[in-house]
Amino acid sequence: MRILRSMLSFYSSFAFAGFLLTAACLGTLYTTGIAMFTFLFWIKVGTMWIIYYFVDHNKRKEYYYYDNLGISKRVLWIPALAFDFLVFIVSTIVLMLKMNGSQTGG
Amino acid sequence: MVHKLEVDSIILEFGHHRVLQDVYFTSETGKITGILGRNGCGKSCLMNIIYGVLPATDKSIRIDGKPIFDGYRDPQLFRYLPQFNFIPKDFTVRRIFSDFGLDFASFINWFPEFEKFHQRKLGKLSGGERRIVEVYAILAAKTKFCMLDEPFSHIMPLHVEVLKNIMLEEKKNKGVIITDHMHRYITEISDHLYVITNGKAHLTKEADDLKRLGYLH
């Protein structure tokens, strides 16, 4: 429970930026079409790396807090980035299915 | 149960500059081990090496004879207070005490004026108040050894005296390793006192040793 709460606290500090970028990618995909997916995929990967770089730098002192609770940097980052990317993938698939459905229906 | 920490063969180099060479010291349950030294002599580096977050050229760290490589991975072995503020500002005092498994009522017995801060975020406290919460969290949490790097920074003398009493109480259950530039506080409470000079840790026996080793004039 303590570990989960710490992971959520850590993720919440940059979740908004991740969601915002996912929303921007989805918006672009919706207006330009599926052909842009590969480009947006790499944009998402690149922005995740940028978020990691800045958050890692800004929170380097706070890692000592989590270390003192037995929670490593890896335990904080891997689930957070995996969840952020999963949200991107799932929402992209849902959007693609809807776009496909509306084209077929029309 | 008494646990013994042995630190030896610590060598730390930055390029061609050797900061620590063949450092040896011990700590054990029921004792406070003080470490003094000039700025840049490697006190904080030494603690970071013991904690496992700073790679050393060579090191040997053992607890009860068993080698320890990454102390930070197990809070039951080590807790570490870095010299800077490390607790996220948006965490409430209540949350911090919950995370470290601490009883707030016991804390209030030591610091009654903190009762009103229970629900308050750490960032809303003054620098000294914030440091007290950080020191207490590390000092009172369950572990075998706790390392405190400059615990008295920003704290007024009245509260330093309280913290010293907490250290004397807590050392019954753990080994305490402490470093600070307020050397009088350190010498008053330490059972063993080391001075790091020229990269080596020297065990001191009397006050004049601090002058002889170049820490005091």
Image: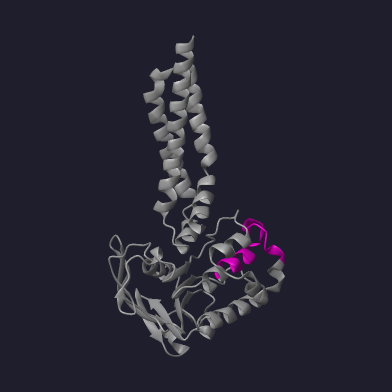
Q: Residue B52 placed where, x, y %?
A: 36, 65
What's the image's color scheme? one colour
Q: Residue at x 40, y 47 (%)?
A: A78
> Magenta stretch containing residue A49, yes or no?
no
Q: Is residue B37 visible?
A: no
Apparent side of residue B7 relative to residue A21 in the rendered image (left or right) = left
Which residues are drawn in magenta?
Answer: B116-135
Which residue: 44% across, 22% down?
A96
- Above or below, comparing residue B58 to residue B2 in the picture: above
Give the image location of residue B33, x and y in percent. 45, 81
Q: Quadrant of residue B40?
A: bottom left
Q: Quadrant of the N terminus of chain B?
A: bottom left
The structure residue drawn at horizontal position 45% and vertical position 73%, both measured from the top left corner, is B38
Q: Residue furthest bottom?
A: B206
Name, please, the residue furthest toward the front.
A105
B126 left or right of A6 in image? right
Q: Outermost residue, top direction? A: A106
Q: Compared to B211, does B121 lie above or below?
A: above
| Secondary structure predominantly adopted by residues drawn in magenta | helix
Residue A54: x %, y % from top left: 46, 44
Vertical order, A102 against A18 (above or below): above
Look at the image and tell me whether residue B125 can be seen: yes
Q: Residue at x 51, y 27 (%)?
A: A24
* For residue B78, above or below residue B121: below
Total marks shown come to: 0
Q: Give yes or no for residue B123 being in the magenta stretch.
A: yes
* In-front residue for pair B206/B143: B143
